[in-house]
Image (spheres, helix red, strand yellow):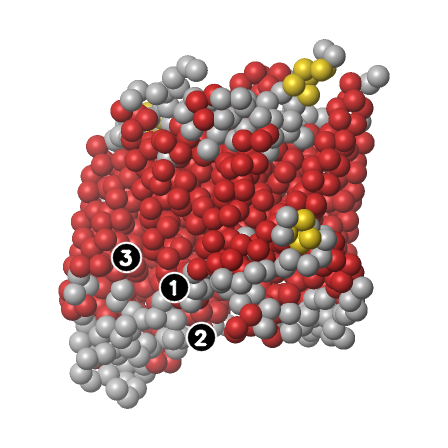
Amino acid sequence: MSLLVFYLFAAIAVLAALGMVVLRNPVHSALSLALVFVSLAAMYVLLSAPFIAVAQVMIYAGAILILFVFVIMLLSPGTDQGVGALKAQRGLAILFGAALLVLLIAVLGGAVLPPTRGTFTPEAIAAEGDTQAVGALLFTNFLLPFEITSILLLVAIVGVIVLAKKRQSISKQ
Amino acid sequence: MDPLALVIIEALIKSIVVIIVLLTGFAYLTLMERMVVARIQVRVGPNRVGRVFGIAALQPIADAIKMIFKEDFIPANADKLIYVLAPGIAVGTALLAWAVIPLNPPLTIFGYTINFEIANVNVAVLYLLAIGSLSIYGIVLGGWSANNKYSLLGALRSTAQMVSYEVSLGLSLVGVLMVSGTLSLTQIVQQQSMIWNVVWQPLGFVIYLVCALAEINRVPFDLPEAETELVAGYQTEYSSLKFALFYMAEYINMLTISAIASTVFLGGYQGPFGILPGVHWLLIKMLIFIFIFMWIRGTLPRFRYDQLMRFGWQVLLPLALANTFVTAVVLVLLGK
Amino acid sequence: MPILVPDINLRIIAPALIVTVTAIVVLLGELVTPAERKRWLGYLSIAGLVVAAFAAFSLWGANASGFSGMVVADNFGLFLTLTIALSAALSILLSIPFIHAHEIDQGEYYVLLLASVAGMIVMATATDLIVIFLGLELLSLPLYILAAFQREDTRSLEAGIKYFLLGAFSSAFFLYGIALVFGATGTTNLAKIAASLAQSAGSPMLSIGVGLLMVGFAFKVALVPFHWWTPDVYDGAPTTVTAFMSVAVKAAAFGAFFRTFQFALPALALDWRAVAAVLAVLTMTLGNVAALLQSNVKRMLAYSSIAHAGYILIALVAMSANGLSSALFYLLAYTVTNLGAFGAVIALSDGARERLEIKDFAGAAREHPLVALALTICLLSLAGFPPFAGFVGKFLIFGAAVETGWAWLAVIGVLNSLVSVYFYLRPVVQMYMSEPAEGWSGIRVAPLVALALLIAVISVIALGVFPAPAIALAAGGLIR
């Protein structure tokens, strides 16, 4: 049953991802991407990680992509007119993309994961609660990365303001 | 019988019941709103169709029939697929939230325990926020696809507004989560059998209500549709059933945020001091909220766009952050 | 619920922490500093960097790890920390008059630069792929913005956007690499990856993951064929930012590059050494040949920095203790030399009008003999002439390569150095042999620029004549 659900959402995710690349209208692309995010969230649920699933929908589909759509609507660029001057790139891109795809399928399709199971088996998660598990990890083993991320976000905010704010002509006088 | 199949069948039945109740409830909410606003403006309001005790009991049905038989119009340069999809997304996301709201204490009949929520998810609060953040799509896409300036302006406004207020909305709930120590709505309700969360989180409660009003684009945050400046904002071009769907989404959202506010802050189906828990308490609390929302609509003017942004970022967000911080400090001092 | 105690060891991350705190203090200070006193924010930043450097000194030899094995304070990381702090301090000395002349003297400039330094220190001392990635992002994000800091100049904006788009693209490669390595080994910790690979043979998934990691690193240090962004970004960004990122990013990224590959992935050395050798040859050759064709000094130095990344990669291919210490020494030497060269270019500019074409330098020696001399010394050091720092660095790296049986790589490196002499000498010839162009009179070199130039040139000569102490420090810096 859960395998069936997996294949269903996997198929949706792959098709939507293709649509995101192939569709000409940027809003349609963005919507396909939203569909990808939601299908991925469904897979996280199957992996007994509902917290990650919900966070995925809330952050990616609900916040980031909405900002994408916002910007697309503000700029309203119309539809993509296809390749411009670099016609030769297109053939090469398809060639290398196909090569990469074959390589990844060949390698990852036959990949054997290490036989040892990690700490967070479905049973352990069920006993502890997945939100609790994520929280405990964030504030113990991953404390440093967590705090670095906060600095990173601060820098991003400062950067946006530097780039967007009107600059007072300081040394004009 | 296969236990998984049983679960699925049970969820299906519950979903159908909830959807039917919501759709009927929506219809009578419109009537209630027309009555309440009429009284505030010292008018009589609808009192003709199927009159019972001075109330036009069949008015919603008449409205529905009128809506259905209007011409279904799609503008020539609209993005047809998305134009059709958008009202559906709006209603769909509005209904999805109801999957996790506990309506009644569990009942045991013939040895089979029925939980009165469709799914007891242990991240229910986050699920509600996630679904809430998706509900933007209906409005934004509806406004964009109509290919109309007013619609687009409405869509842009609603994006900016909802993204801004979502942050404070989430933060206002964090205080409750810290007090109760769980993300499961079922557990949050059960913990409130004696003392409601609003006692610990009065500021969080107020911030939640304000942000929730903004999230569902009701007065005084109804800039996305603002008839006086934007015709009807994102729904300018919509007519017939599609328009009705947007209308439906708006009222269901109103029911949803009343239900969440009741559940998270006012004990949900729990009566005061543990008196007779049951769905009637939830309904009473929701009706009070809904009446307040209508009252606000009848009395308050609309925000101007810059006021809206300043209020969201410079008042609500710092307050919500301060509330979270103070809650954390107090919890640590109490040694919880 | 059990109380969980995180493994907090603030002493180990003291340098990065001090830099971060300084950045935040400067950010707040910007609010209360009147426009004509903005330079004090620069001095404050330098003070913070000096304190961070002292903290790094005090940790020398500590060899402690902390935060559940996420970071380490070993001499390798500390040497890089010192190099990065030095490059940042010199860049700020150059920046204070520069950003004033270009009317971009906002305190955020220093904040972003310091944040980038914090990211670099994190990256150089990280022992977990996740922390390396976060360090990479924390160093890159401020640089994207700094590159676009001259908002009125479209080329600066172009540089920022190009750097951002390609940088984000390469981050994705790096992240995918981390994911695949995690899938193959079950961990992101470098020590555990090494332990896991010591027990079981690698898998194709691991190889692809390692390859993607290499792409990510190669992009950041600008190895051919992942170098396309370099000339445009170096050319468009404000000159002081170019100076900073041409040296400091290399120090941090090569630090993590060496640590990841030499420490965590020796089991796959047979494969990645061959790839790295090919990349080194391509990078050196293409960098030097392309530099021959440039008429703009910034672009020339951009291609030269690509070529130098190739030389340093030889030290990775050698994969020995000597290779490691030679790379550290080379990074230090390259830092002071390149900053000296950029400092001289900034010193020769006329207020906001910069002289960036090589022909603009005609006759500079007659008007500014000392600056011309400094530029000459730095360019000769870049080309690898004795008795300057660049010569010792190249000598050590080529020596390490020969020792470990990669003599052919060293030969190609030497041949490339010979090619590079031609383009490094072109500005020198212009300065000394040509008639002065218009507009030289009345240009005054800002005292801070002169100071930075002095420090750089003295270091170049000192590292060239008495390299022993620095080599000893670098040799103590073995990866744990």
- Residue C122: x %, y % from top left: 38, 40
Mark 3 vs mark 1, foreground winner is: 1
Query: How much space separates mark 3 and mark 1, taking CA atoms?
Result: 34 Å
* Amino acid type of the residue that numbered disc 3 sits on in the rendered structure: Tyr
Q: Earlier in the sequence, mark 2 or mark 3?
A: 3
| Apparent side of residue C313 relative to residue B55 in the rendered image (left or right) | left
Q: Are marks 2 and 3 in contact (CB under 8 Å)?
A: no
Viewer-nearest residue: C140 or A139 = A139
Q: Is residue B256 above or below residue B69?
A: above
Viewer-nearest residue: C384 or C90 = C90
Q: Chain of mark 2?
A: C
Q: Residues within 10 Å of mark 1 (few under 14, many from 20)?
A: few
Q: Which residue is mark 2?
A: C154
Q: Residues within 10 Å of mark 2 (few under 14, many from 20)?
A: few
Viewer-nearest residue: C196 or C329 = C196
| Apparent side of residue B270 relative to residue C93 in the rendered image (left or right) | right
Q: Are marks 1 and 2 in contact (CB under 8 Å)?
A: no
Q: Chain of mark 3?
A: C
Q: Specify the label residue B315 is tagged with.
A: none
Quarter of the image with the C terminus of chain C in it: top left
> Residue drawn at (60%, 26%), measured in percent from left and top?
B104
Q: Is residue C263 above or below residue C138?
A: above
For label 3, the SS is helix
- Residue B50: x %, y % from top left: 72, 53
> Residue drawn at (57%, 16%), measured in percent from left and top?
A127
Q: Which residue is mark 1?
A: B307
Q: Which residue is mark 3?
A: C110
- Residue C95: x %, y % from top left: 26, 63
* Amino acid type of the residue that numbered disc 2 sits on in the rendered structure: Thr
Viewer-nearest residue: A136 or C95 = A136
